[in-house]
Structures are given as C-alpha cells and as structure tokens.
Amino acid sequence: MSPKHFEATYQAMWDTFAAQIAEAKLGKRTDGAQLATHYRRVCEHLALAQSRAYPIHLVSRLESLTQDAHQLIYRRQDYGMRQLAQLLRVGLPNAVRAERRVVLLALLLFALPLVLSLALSWHSPDFALRLLNASQLRNYEAMYADGQDALGRLRGADGDWQMFGHYIFNNIGIGFRAFGAGILAGVGSAFVLIYNGLLIGVVAGHLQRVGLGHNFWPFVATHSAFELTGIVLSGAAGLRIGLGWIVPGRLSRGEALRASARAAIPLVYAAFFLLLVAAGFEAFWSSAAWIAPAVKYGVAAGCWALVLAWLCLMGRGSVHAR
C-alpha cells in the first residue's frame, strides 16, 4: 500500500479521532470505549508507517494523535488528599455561602430556642422539669460533678476511645435526623433544630443554676464550635430539601427536589466533617479535667475563629481562578 493510499484509506478515522481528542481536552463527555478503540488502531497505523518508512509528516501526525490520546486515557486520576484538601479549602465554604439564606434560617431556628431556654432554665427552677424528668437532670449533674478525672463521661465508659465512638454515633445521628427530616417539606428539620436548641439550652441553664457551670462551660467551649455549627448546617441542608418540595418554581417537583438535593449535599459534607472533628475534641480534649479552664477557653476562641473564617472567608475568588 502506497503512503497516499494508506492516508486516503484511514483519513476519515484519524479526523474523527482528532475531533474526539479535542472535545475530551475541553472537558466534554466522550465515549471512552470508542476513544480507546481508536487509540489502539492508530497505534497500529503508526507502527506500520514507521516500519514502511512513510513520509515524515504522516508519521508525525500519527505520533501526535497517539501521544494526545495516551495522556487522556492514562492520565493520573487524583482523588486523594489533594482533591480532599481542595474540597475543604474551596468547595465546601463556597457551597455554604451560596446557601447563606437557608443557613441563616437554620441558625435562627436553633439559636433562639437555645438562648431562651438557657435563660429560663437558669433563672426558673421548674422550667427544666418541663422538658426533662428529674432522673435525666440528675444524670447530667453526675456527668459534670466535681472531683472527676473525665468530665461528661457516661457511666460504664472506660476510656476516651470508647467515648469517641459514642460521640461520633451521637453527633452523626443528630446530623442525619436534622437533614433527613427535611423531606417532610422542611418541617422535620425545623423541629429537630428547635428541639435540640431547647434541649441544649435547658441542660446548660440547669447546670449553671445548680452550681456546676465551672465544669460544664470549659467542657463544651471548644467542641461546640464544630458541633453546633455542624448541627446548623445539617438542618440547613434539610431545609434546602424542603424548599425544593414547597417552592418548586418553574421546575417540576421532581426536578426541584433533585436541584435542592444537589445544593444540599455540600452542606451535608461540611456538617459531617465538623461533627466528626467535634467528636474528636469532645472525647480527647474537652473531657480532660486536668486541663485548666483558661486554656480550654483560649483554644475554644481559636476554634470558633477558625470555623467562622473557614465558612466566611476561605475559597473566595477561587472559583474563577481555577
């Protein structure tokens, strides 16, 4: 076969292959199986052209096609720590800021009941008993009583690792309830946020009133930066789902729910990351009675500043810079 005949026979396939490579480089979706098949065929053509000493322009074109395709097919897929760092540094904070209205609504639904119940429980001896029974209050008092080696530890828990598992299960459970209940038109998420705000406020106010605040506040100060923020973001994700259900706009209800789910998923990732960090601090740092309260308050201030800076500042401008 002459070089001219060879080129005329496969020219159409090479053009199709080149167009497919160009689209793949632009990030467009392409048929991977067809790309691989064409790659093998062109490799065969290149070997044939080289063995028959075909003109240099023909060999060069085939070399260029095979090299470009090789880079596309065998390029390194980076799904490791670098991509995770990019998600934490840019993706999640940008996603949270994009949903700032629903995040603010979740914050109000959680924080207002917390502050109100804390004040009422602190100044009214009977208020705590309207939400919790006497046995539950005594258990909380025992967890933060003076003279313990580890604050906030459950009865029967022998070590920090055991409590770490308990806190992960507990925190993630709250996050799942706050998010999953959003399918009930968002009402479920609102209820979970209000209920947890009330419960936390009642316990805090009661312990302060009975004289155990000096143990309780150093215990919760640090991990609350991650835990409370995680609960709010979980609730915000649930409210986002409910918004798609209640206000579909011009979309069908199914399409609106799918769009809401896509917007809510980054909030869920951010929330569960924060709740996981909170469990670590709660088990290994907050419970340590030997650490001075002043040190815990100092670390807590740093953690709150870190969480707020992460959500409010990180990733700004990176979307357009990528």
Image (cartoon, rainbow, N blue to C red):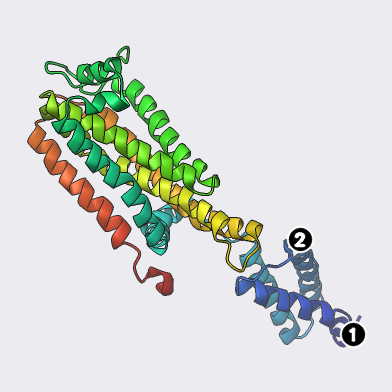
Is residue 135 placed above or below 50 in the rendered structure?
above
Is the C-beta separation of discs 1 and 2 under 8 Å? no
Is residue 181 placed above or below 266 in the rendered structure?
above
Q: Which residue is mark 1?
A: 5
Q: Quadrant of residue 21?
A: bottom right
Per the model, the C-alpha gap separating discs 1 and 2 is: 28 Å
- The N terminus lies in which quarter of the figure? bottom right
Q: Is residue 181 left or right of residue 67?
A: left
Counting other residues with Cα less than 10 Å from the Cα at mark 2, is it few (<14), some (14-19), or many (20 or more)?
Answer: few
Q: Which residue is mark 2?
A: 33
Q: Is residue 69 left or right of residue 267?
A: right
Residue in the image at 24% along x and 52% along y: 306
Q: Position of residue 188 (x, y in %)?
A: 48, 42
Q: Nearer the viewer, residue 174 or 251?
A: 251
Disc 1 on helix, strand or loop?
A: helix
Residue in the image at 34% along x and 56% along y: 104
The numbered mark, 1 or 2, whose residue comes first in the sequence reads: 1
Q: Nearer the viewer, residue 115 or 268?
A: 115
Q: State the mark number for residue 234.
A: none
Residue in the image at 27% along x and 51% along y: 307
Residue in the image at 17% along x and 26% along y: 207
Q: Nearer the viewer, residue 317 or 249?
A: 249
Disc 2 on helix, strand or loop?
A: helix
Q: Amino acid at mark 2?
A: Ala
Q: Is residue 245 left or right of residue 275?
A: right
